[in-house]
């Protein structure tokens, strides 16, 4: 099979419906709130909304799970968490939801996604991102996951990062 | 290497989720930490400048307002720097790491829709000459409450500047 076709299945899940005003607001809040006394009012001025409308709309996006988390976004590496490992697991399809839910609850797991396999090169279907102060911390966290979630027989690989070429917030809408 | 003040530690750790949605949110933080709004704003400016804080804002659920994907490439060691640089040049790329694996370059792409995302992937394949393994999220098992920072045990931090 053509490499590209093989690597690009399945299609992405459907997207949530966002109205035009949300679009404008998202464009602004993706890069962060202004550090001013009335940040929501200042955002509102830029998109023709009142302070109250901005606050209500962010609350709505938060509640409807379009926003996963609203708050201070820290940079792990600079704060002393030098080691990060993308740990990938090859889990039976009928167990992936249960085991994924177990792993997703640990506070050192900063991301826990199911993704497609790309056979034969890539058999792993569950991805956990694990941060720690050094490799030993990360490896002991992984050992804890294995013990607590019963993953002894699950094939996995630990992909430590050795160089960060780029890291910043996602830009969903270009200005 | 430097150490953080108590106010800085609390600002970093206590407001990673459920940031106040009130007219004066920094005043609300100040009240919780027993300080002034000015000091909170000043502290956040400093933490941003030093690279400890990326932003005060929203983390969007993957694929809720746009399309994003994890992507991987397997490239020869001697070319990885140059290829990483080419990939970094795309504004759609927000993360890009070298990792210990045969697939050694891992990056995350975000665009407003799947069509745009695919166009960027095509372009990257053409520009670099290597196929991209495309690994979109299927299911999210993680409830994001931020990251609990441990400020004890041999704690030191490094400024990004």
Image (cartoon, helix red, strand yellow):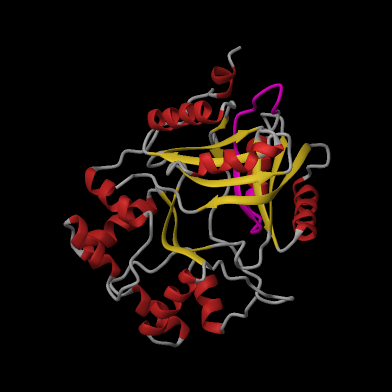
Whether A115 is among the magenta residues is yes
- Can you say which quadrant of the picture contains the N terminus of chain B? bottom right
Regarding residue B46, the answer to whether it shows in the image is yes
- Name the residue: 46% across, 53% down: A169
The location of residue A148, given as percent across then percent down, is 77, 51
Q: Front-most of A74 and B103?
A: B103
Residue A171 horizontal side relative to residue A75, left or right: left
Q: Front-most of B119 and A30?
A: B119
Residue A132 horizontal side relative to residue B4, left or right: right
- Can you say which quadrant of the picture contains the C terminus of chain B? bottom right
The location of residue B38, given as percent across then percent down, is 36, 83
The location of residue A91, given as percent across then percent down, is 71, 33
- The span shown in magenta is A104-122
- Name the residue: 38% across, 44% down: A172
Q: Is residue B36 above or below residue B105?
A: below
Magenta-colored segment: predominant secondary structure = loop
- Name the residue: 31% across, 50% down: A27
Whether A60 is among the magenta residues is no
Regarding residue A72, the answer to whether it shows in the image is no
């Amino acid at each position: 099979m053509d490499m590209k076709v093989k690597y690009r299945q399945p299609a992405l899940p459907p997207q949530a419906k966002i109205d035009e005003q949300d679009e404008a607001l998202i464009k602004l809040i993706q890069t962060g709130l202004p550090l001013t006394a009335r940040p929501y009012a200042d955002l509102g001025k830029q998109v023709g909304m009142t302070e109250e409308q901005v606050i209500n709309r962010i609350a709505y996006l938060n509640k409807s799970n379009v926003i996963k988390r609203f708050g201070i976004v820290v940079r792990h590496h600079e704060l002393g968490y030098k080691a990060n490992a993308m740990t990938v697991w090859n889990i039976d399809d009928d167990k992936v939801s249960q085991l994924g839910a177990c792993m997703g609850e640990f506070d050192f797991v900063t991301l826990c996604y199911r993704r497609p396999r790309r056979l034969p090169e890539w058999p792993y279907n569950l991805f956990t991102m694990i941060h720690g102060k050094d490799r030993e911390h990360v490896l002991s966290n992984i050992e804890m996951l294995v013990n607590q979630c019963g993953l002894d027989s699950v094939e996995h690989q630990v992909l430590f990062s050795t160089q960060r070429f780029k890291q910043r917030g996602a830009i969903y809408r270009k200005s | 290497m430097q150490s953080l003040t108590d106010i800085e530690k609390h600002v970093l750790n206590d407001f990673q989720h459920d940031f106040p949605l009130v007219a004066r949110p920094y005043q609300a933080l100040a009240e919780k930490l027993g300080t002034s709004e000015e000091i909170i704003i000043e502290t956040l400016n400093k933490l941003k400048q030093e690279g400890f804080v990326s932003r005060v804002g929203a983390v969007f659920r993957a694929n809720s307002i746009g399309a994003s994907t994890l992507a991987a490439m397997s490239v020869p060691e001697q070319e990885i720097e140059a290829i990483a640089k080419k990939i970094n040049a795309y504004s759609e790329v927000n993360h890009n790491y070298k990792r210990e694996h045969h697939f050694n370059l891992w990056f995350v792409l975000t665009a407003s829709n799947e069509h745009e995302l695919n166009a960027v992937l095509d372009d990257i394949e053409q520009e670099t000459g290597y196929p991209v393994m495309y690994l979109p999220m299927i299911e999210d098992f993680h409830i994001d409450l931020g990251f609990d920072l441990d400020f004890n045990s041999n704690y030191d931090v490094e400024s990004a500047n």
